[in-house]
């Protein structure tokens, strides 16, 4: 039995350690844009949220993303992200179901 190392990341809202694949990455690009990175490949400073709307709301309220990204996230951006987040959440959760074991 080969044991594979699963990279763990912490959700910035609930501080739970989760496999990277089960988290949604929010990235601050070198152009100072803050966006959701579903590919996990965009360059820039990343912060992770577990795919729960509740966690996003918590991050918004506690400004956890601001701290994690070391960048002041404008309320408009949070609004934008919250819409994006709602949109990707379903897609994201659906993907979870289908990639249980490669
Ligand atoms: Zn969380």
Image (spheres, rainbow, N blue to C red):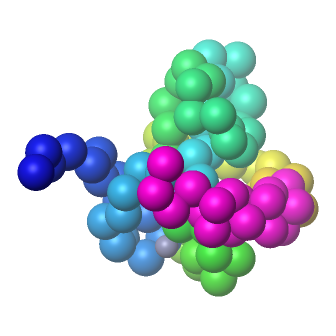
**Which residue is found at the position 88% from the left and 61% from the top?**
87
- Residue 63: percent from the left, percent from the top? 57, 64
Q: Which of the 4 image quarters holds residue 16?
A: bottom left
Q: Is residue 27 magenta?
A: no
Range drawn in magenta: 84-102
**Which residue is found at the position 69% from the left and 68% from the top?**
93
Res. 79 visible in picture? no
Res. 68 visible in picture? yes
Q: Is residue 89 magenta?
A: yes
**Which residue is found at the position 63% from the left and 68% from the top?**
97
- Relative to 76, say whether 29 is above or below: above
Query: Outermost residue, front direction?
Result: 1
Q: Which of the 4 image quarters holds residue 24?
A: bottom right
Residue toward you, 51 or 3 = 3
- Residue 21: percent from the left, percent from the top? 48, 51
Answer left or right for 1 relative to 97: left
**Which residue is found at the position 68% from the left and 42% from the top?**
38
Residue toward you, 27 or 89 = 89
Residue toward you, 44 or 86 = 86
Q: Main secondary structure of the magenta part?
A: helix
Answer left or right for 10 relative to 42: left
């Amino acid at each position: 039995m080969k044991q594979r190392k699963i990279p763990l990341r912490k959700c910035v809202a609930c501080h739970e350690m989760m496999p990277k694949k089960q988290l949604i990455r929010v990235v601050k690009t070198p152009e100072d844009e803050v966006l959701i990175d579903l590919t996990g490949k965009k360059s820039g400073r990343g912060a992770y949220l577990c795919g729960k709307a509740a966690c996003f709301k918590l991050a918004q309220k506690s400004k956890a993303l601001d701290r994690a990204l070391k960048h002041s996230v404008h309320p408009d951006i949070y609004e934008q992200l919250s819409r994006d987040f709602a949109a990707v959440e379903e897609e994201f959760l659906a993907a979870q179901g289908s990639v249980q074991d490669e």
